[in-house]
Image: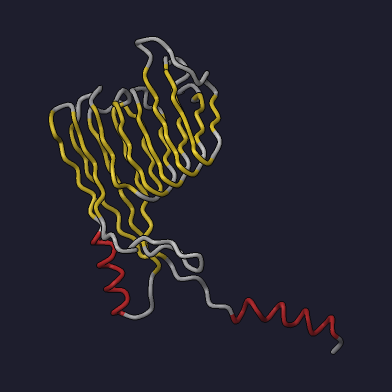
Amino acid sequence: MNLRLAAAAIAVCLPLGAKPPKPDMSMVTTERVEFAPGGAIQVSGSVGELNIEGWDRAEVEITVTRSTFRPDTARQQDLAKSQLNAIQVTVERKSPTELAIRTDRPKRGFLARAAHRRPDVQLDYRIRVPRDSRLAIRHEDGDVTVYDVSGAIEASVRHGDILLQLPEAGQYSFDARSRFGDVYSDFPVQSAPAPAKRMLLRVCSGGITIQKMAPRG
């Protein structure tokens, strides 16, 4: 067998010997709370992918997907389940017009991302709110996307991107800054007189993008 044929044979055999990736172990929870339009919603302690979408209902729906790499042994699987269960997302209605969504989790490196491995637990939030809700978001690591929410928004992210997709017809006043990243906006990023909705956006490391929504069908 010449060298070319030998190399080709090795290339064909390598994928057959490789172990297939293990599927994720996931836990999904959904909670719904009646909530009048125009109220204030606080989101704090979140990490991972945070998606907030406006809708027509007078309620808030919070769906959280917790996932981790599925291990081999039963003991390891029990440990993985305990890791997922250790992350608590609580919803507290402080008043008829105030709602707090908070994530609590173990602090000592539980979600630490090492260079040679994926994080122990990944979180994905999908939160649907009345369209004219006011948002106050304190997100740690990961991306934040807000779609079709026309109320005032304050959002901060330590490491990750912020994407706002806003109704084109709204009146907004933007204050958007990233310490290590770029800011892009389809709207003029400047102060505007009342009754413009204030958008206060802060990122330590990552970008900020503000887009005009396509018209709803």
Task: State the residue at coordinates (41%, 45%).
Answer: 158
Left or right: 204 with respect to 150? right
- In the rendered image of this protein, does residue 9 appear above or below residue 111? below
Residue occupying the far right of the picture: 2
Residue occupying the far left of the picture: 95
Q: Quadrant of residue 162?
A: top left
Q: Quadrant of residue 121?
A: bottom left
Residue occupying the far bottom of the picture: 1
Left or right: 6 with respect to 131? right
Find residue 127 and report its horizontal and vertical position in percent.
32, 39
In the image, 161 versus 211, the foreground residue is: 161
The quadrant the N terminus occupies is bottom right
- In the rendered image of this protein, does residue 72 appear above or below residue 171? below
In the image, 52 versus 182, the foreground residue is: 182
Find residue 26 and report its horizontal and vertical position in percent.
34, 61
- In the rendered image of this protein, does residue 45 appear above or below residue 81? above
Task: State the residue at coordinates (48%, 21%).
Answer: 215
Find residue 95 and report its horizontal and vertical position in percent.
12, 30
Left or right: 55 with respect to 86? right
Residue occupying the far front of the picture: 179
Tally the marks: 0
Rendered image coloring scheme: secondary structure
Task: State the residue at coordinates (20%, 47%).
Answer: 90
Left or right: 168 with respect to 45? right
Find residue 83 and report its horizontal and vertical position in percent.
28, 65
Task: State the residue at coordinates (42%, 31%).
Answer: 201
